[in-house]
Amino acid sequence: MKIALNKQTDHSLPEQIFQSISDRILSGLMIEGEKLPSVRKLAEQLEVSLVTVQKSYELLEKKQLIERRQGKGSYVRRSEQKTVETNPYNWQNMIEDFLPRAQTWMEMKSFSREYKYNLSLANLSHDLLPVYELTDMITKVIRDEPMILTKYSPGPGDQILREVVSEYLVDEGLVVPADKIVITSGAQQGLELIAKTFLGEGDVVFVEAPTYIGIIDILKSRGVTIKTVPTNEEGMNLNILLQMCEQFSPKFIYTNPTFQNPTGTILSEKKRRRLVDIAQAFNVIIMEDDPWGELRFEGSIKSMKSMDENGHVIYLKSFSKTISPGFRVGCIIADGKILNKLKASKSVSDLGSPLLNQRIIARFIQSFNFGQHFKKMNALLLLRRNLLIETLNDLQIEGLKWTVPSGGPVMWITFPTQVNTEHLLIDALKQELSFLPSAMCYPNEPEVNHLRISYGNLSLNTYKESLKLFKEVVKNHMESLNPFTEDTPLF
Amino acid sequence: MKIALNKQTDHSLPEQIFQSISDRILSGLMIEGEKLPSVRKLAEQLEVSLVTVQKSYELLEKKQLIERRQGKGSYVRRSEQKTVETNPYNWQNMIEDFLPRAQTWMEMKSFSREYKYNLSLANLSHDLLPVYELTDMITKVIRDEPMILTKYSPGPGDQILREVVSEYLVDEGLVVPADKIVITSGAQQGLELIAKTFLGEGDVVFVEAPTYIGIIDILKSRGVTIKTVPTNEEGMNLNILLQMCEQFSPKFIYTNPTFQNPTGTILSEKKRRRLVDIAQAFNVIIMEDDPWGELRFEGSIKSMKSMDENGHVIYLKSFSKTISPGFRVGCIIADGKILNKLKASKSVSDLGSPLLNQRIIARFIQSFNFGQHFKKMNALLLLRRNLLIETLNDLQIEGLKWTVPSGGPVMWITFPTQVNTEHLLIDALKQELSFLPSAMCYPNEPEVNHLRISYGNLSLNTYKESLKLFKEVVKNHMESLNPFTEDTPLF
């Protein structure tokens, strides 16, 4: 902690130290619960006596800014009465920035609170992921190739991984050479890479409504105009999209056609072909985001990339849902100049993704029996989806509707219009239960009467408990909305 | 073609257009045979006169970067006669992008060719890095905490790592709470994060000349105006910088004050204090890039961040040179609203860095004896630096000069002005020997008679061989330049 002490002033040293720390706390730069340096450490650093620092900490405690915990140290006090006063960082108010929205961050902050009954995060539980096979592979890779720790990856990705991914994708019906694959740190980085390389102010991008919250943040940071395409259980309305293309000349269309996030719906093969045709006709670029197409309960569906002849589709794949979210490995597939630019842009962004992670995923994909794994995992996911449907049926709420995803980890639930799911969430959080309310899934005017449930995030038992809890919370909330319950005489 | 033009500068518009297209061609973003926009089209798009574009194309032609074909237009010049096939992706020519330069990518491509005698890459050889201690730790972490594989990291970084880094930095003279630390995927991502969050068209940024090639790419992708501050063995000339602040109102100053990349020089403590003062007086933000401050042969020097009172300094640290480049773990330290925005921006960019890598680095830092390691590693690096100095002395070239870094892995060598190090590099590559020529280290007018040697990248034996080779290549090149060798009779 940098504290400028001035000896030519009538404020004593303890007062100056007090003031400096107090400023930091009141302006939110030191946050509630944050630990202060120990008295000894701060005294040494500021070259003052222990007594001086001791006195300043006593002042802070008296003003209820910090609390001292026996044997543990001093912490910024938790308090609701915080008034912001002049602080040394106020000049920063004039620094313009280019990040007008970051719901992803808010949402991640809520993950990290780790509600016990987290039905919000679209992640898969450890009992659905191949954790032990992966740890074995980690051990193997660092034993066989320790020297990868001393090397950078090539910017566009480890060649071995790119070749392995190329083979992996054949099973998903996509034939692309390794050279057309750019490895990214998760699909989110891929989306961001595409946006920052090709999109800027004045550009128009179409998205589904509702859509993935992460893409909204990214597009807004680029200053583009986002237009929403009306979307229902069968995906985007392509007749309207066609009219919109004529009217707005979009540069990109972002879509998540397989088990869409947040609705879980699927765009039919026929509609995919038509969308690719439209893209060709208008020279629009489709961003086809496919984070979890492998998690399917039945059949399979061709990617738009596999229908793409002239490089109008950029395809994004993540391994966060099929192998491990903590590894942050995904990829982009593109053609021509777009591909070239993305390779360059990835290199400039971070000098390439971690080589260790790439090599581990490469060798894991090579040796793992995905067919068998998906069969088992998807059967378990389907079971979870069905438990959710049972719960919703049990609720017997008139007007309650939901999508029935044929794959993926999320379901979209629509309440009667008088329900605001952000209010429902307040009730839920009191019970340690969370879900994704719909409001943040719309870039423009939000709809507030939907919510997304992620049914793969919890272990099965906790998931069952959370469904019970969800039922209760919804029931109570609905009753609180409607004063005319069955027990209330009408006259 | 997106070109950010700045009318408040002493570079003429034709020069700016020339510079932007030249950057694209030299960094491989526009490829041989690619067609340029017609003069009329570009003039319309940039809202400048036909003559302006005409002049810039003439400059490009003069520099042999493009060729103009009668009645057909202008094309990026081909080094060899290659026929361009019509390809289905030609429609992509009209897609505007926001990446005008990517020398980092070119440089990385050359790494991946893996020249045997690579004196170019500023990396440390495996015999200088704690590889085996690190592999042991990897095994330990996945044995103790396999479940981290099933989790995302919080956006701003794993809390355990942030606390460990906070303690680590105390030894480097920097006292910051964990909460002010944002973990990034290497320092490069940190630079990019800062730029994309706070910089845009119209902003002015000062950099040293020469400077780190990665920052030039990043700044150009944001469309900012880059101004270079004259720099010598003692770092930036602060008297000139002060005048420039008055004239240009910069938003950021990027500096790499400790063993600067590419020169290896150091900014004195006195100058650091003055620079922080200037930043405060003008409310400019300093990006203090410190990738390898720990690699010091003597003494130590305070970071500007430790002198910063009001949040004017954003500090970047990398663990690529001290632990492992392949892990991609670095961090940013900032205050106030800047900090808050960076946390949000990091989350939006990639949903956080890989948790596995963060947790491994955290536990590694906690348990590793860095004091002892640095002592040994730096002694070995110093030995390598001295071998390079010996080699340079041996060369006995009049006018050959070099910096004598007191730390870090790079040295800057200046040849007499008739030498172009890009030509020297062509000779060197024939021998599998590479170094970094100076041209790409300048954002505006390049100087071409310097080069950077990285003396830590090779194992000691290969390094010695490469010095021998370097001596030969330089000698031969110098002789080829000067027809009057000792054996040539003057009359």
Image (cartoon, coloured by chain):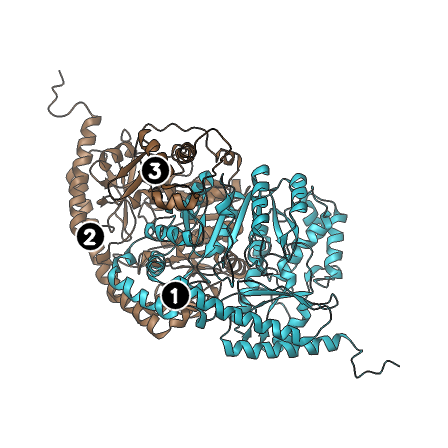
Chain colours: A brown, B cyan
Nearest the eye: A107 or A3: A3
Q: Residue A56: x percent and y percent?
A: 37, 34
Residue A46 left/right relative to B48: left
> Which subunit holds the residue at mark 3?
A
> Which subunit holds the residue at mark 1?
A
* Disc nearer the start of the sequence (3/1): 3
**Does mark 1 fall on the same chain as mark 2?**
yes
**Does mark 3 fall on the same chain as mark 2?**
yes
* Tag nearer the camera, 2 or 1: 1
* Disc nearer the start of the sequence (2/3): 3
Q: Residues within 10 Å of mark 1 (few under 14, many from 20)?
A: many
* Tag nearer the camera, 2 or 3: 3
Residue A205 left/right relative to A115: right
Q: Check the image and report above or below for B191 versus A240.
A: below
Marks counted in the figure total: 3
Q: Secondary structure at mark 2?
A: loop
Q: CA distance from mark 2 to mark 1?
A: 29 Å
Q: CA distance from mark 2 to mark 3?
A: 48 Å
Residue bearing the label numbered 3: A54
Q: Secondary structure at mark 1?
A: helix
Q: Is residue B108 visible?
A: yes
Residue bearing the label numbered 1: A356
Residue A274 left/right relative to A38: right
Q: Amino acid at mark 1?
A: Leu
Q: Residue A263: x percent and y percent?
A: 31, 45
Residue bearing the label numbered 2: A459
Q: Quadrant of the C terminus of chain B?
A: bottom right
